[in-house]
């Protein structure tokens, strides 16, 4: 478990996904979006090293995006809309072959975007779960309905085994550091719609540009 100063703050994550939405939900600020993910990774790390294979991948993808933001074309990566426009116009997106440009911003964000769908489903399941619900089951159901469709067998297997190490629902709520169960449920009720709005915008943007299957 993490030390107190590293304690996960659900509210901060919530606010990152809220504050990344701009232009009436018609764009997403990358920096705030990545801050949301960083908060989630902190939480995942506090659950123990069993999820380090997940957090390593997430951190790696966050890092790729931060490098774009800090790079010479950083201003092109301020928002998802500007990133898509820039990368498509400058042929930085490889639509068919992963090897030419393996780490475009578009394909990297797509991986996080798919994971956001898992998060959205998982949080909604947690929010509406009963006291005796098993977090491993809720997590596996959310995973099977989202990310699993994009993962090879070996990752699906590893993830499914790791889910059994998730803390029980009450412990989970406690680690979130929000307050009583009622307060956690209320917070989740606020969090899910923000994550959903970010997800919906990205899905529409990617679908419009045929980017949803980027290798
Ligand atoms: C709390 C439990 C965490 C469970 C996480 C479920 C997701 C399992 C995903 C398994 C990913 C395995 C690692 C590698 C995958 C990559 O192959 C894959 C594709 O990338 P690429 O470059 O090979 O094409 N990568 C991904 O699919 C991205 C996966 C990112 C997952 C990020 C998950 C972050 C989780 C945060 C914990 C949130 C805690 C929830 C409660 C918070 C309340 C607000």
Image (cartoon, rainbow, N blue to C red):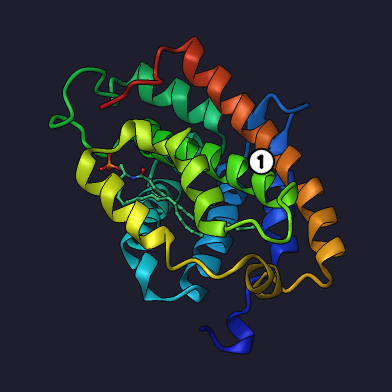
Is 90 drawn above or below residue 172 in the view shown? above
Residue that badge 1 annotates = 195
Quadrant assignment, res 177: bottom right
The single residue placed furthest to the front in the displayed view is 132
Percent from the top left, x then y, of residue 89? 37, 17
Q: Residue at x 27, y 49 (%)?
A: 157
Closer to the camera in the image, 214 or 68: 214
Q: Is residue 60 visible?
A: no
Percent from the top left, x then y, of residue 12? 71, 62
Closer to the camera in the image, 192 or 79: 192
Q: Residue at x 41, y 37 (%)?
A: 147
Q: Residue at x 48, y 33 (%)?
A: 145
In this rendering, position of residue 55 left or right of residue 33: left
- Number of numbered discs: 1
In this rendering, position of residue 8 left or right of residue 207: right
Closer to the camera in the image, 115 or 86: 115
Q: Is mark 1 within 8 Å of ligand 1?
A: no
Q: Residue at x 82, y 72 (%)?
A: 179
Percent from the top left, x then y, of residue 85? 46, 21
Q: Which secondary structure, mark 1?
A: helix
Question: Which quadrant of the rendered structure holds the C terminus?
Answer: top left
Closer to the camera in the image, 114 or 168: 168
Percent from the top left, x then y, of residue 43? 55, 68
Is 48 drawn above or below residue 201 in the view shown? below
The single residue placed furthest to the left in the displayed view is 99
User: Counting other residues with Cα less than 10 Å from the Cα at mark 1, is it few (<14), some (14-19), or many (20 or more)?
Assistant: many
């Amino acid at each position: 478990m993490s030390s107190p100063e590293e304690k996960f703050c659900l509210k901060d994550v919530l606010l990152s996904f809220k504050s990344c939405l701009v232009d009436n939900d018609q764009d997403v600020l990358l920096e705030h979006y990545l801050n949301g993910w960083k908060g989630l990774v902190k939480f995942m790390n506090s659950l123990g090293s069993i999820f380090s294979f997940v957090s390593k991948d997430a951190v790696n993808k966050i890092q790729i995006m931060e490098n774009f933001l800090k790079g010479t074309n950083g201003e092109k990566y301020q928002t998802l809309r500007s990133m898509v426009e820039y990368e498509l116009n400058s042929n930085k997106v490889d639509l068919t072959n992963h090897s030419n440009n393996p780490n475009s911003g578009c394909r990297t964000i797509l991986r996080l975007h798919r994971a956001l769908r898992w998060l959205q489903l998982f949080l909604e399941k947690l929010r509406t779960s009963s006291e005796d619900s098993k977090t491993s089951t809720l997590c596996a159901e959310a995973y099977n309905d989202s990310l699993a469709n994009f993962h090879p067998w070996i990752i699906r297997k590893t993830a499914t085994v790791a889910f059994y190490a998730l803390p029980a629902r009450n412990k989970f709520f406690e680690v979130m550091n929000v307050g009583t169960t009622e307060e956690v449920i209320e917070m989740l009720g606020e969090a899910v719609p923000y994550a959903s709005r970010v997800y919906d915008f990205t899905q529409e943007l990617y679908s419009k540009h045929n980017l949803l299957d980027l290798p």
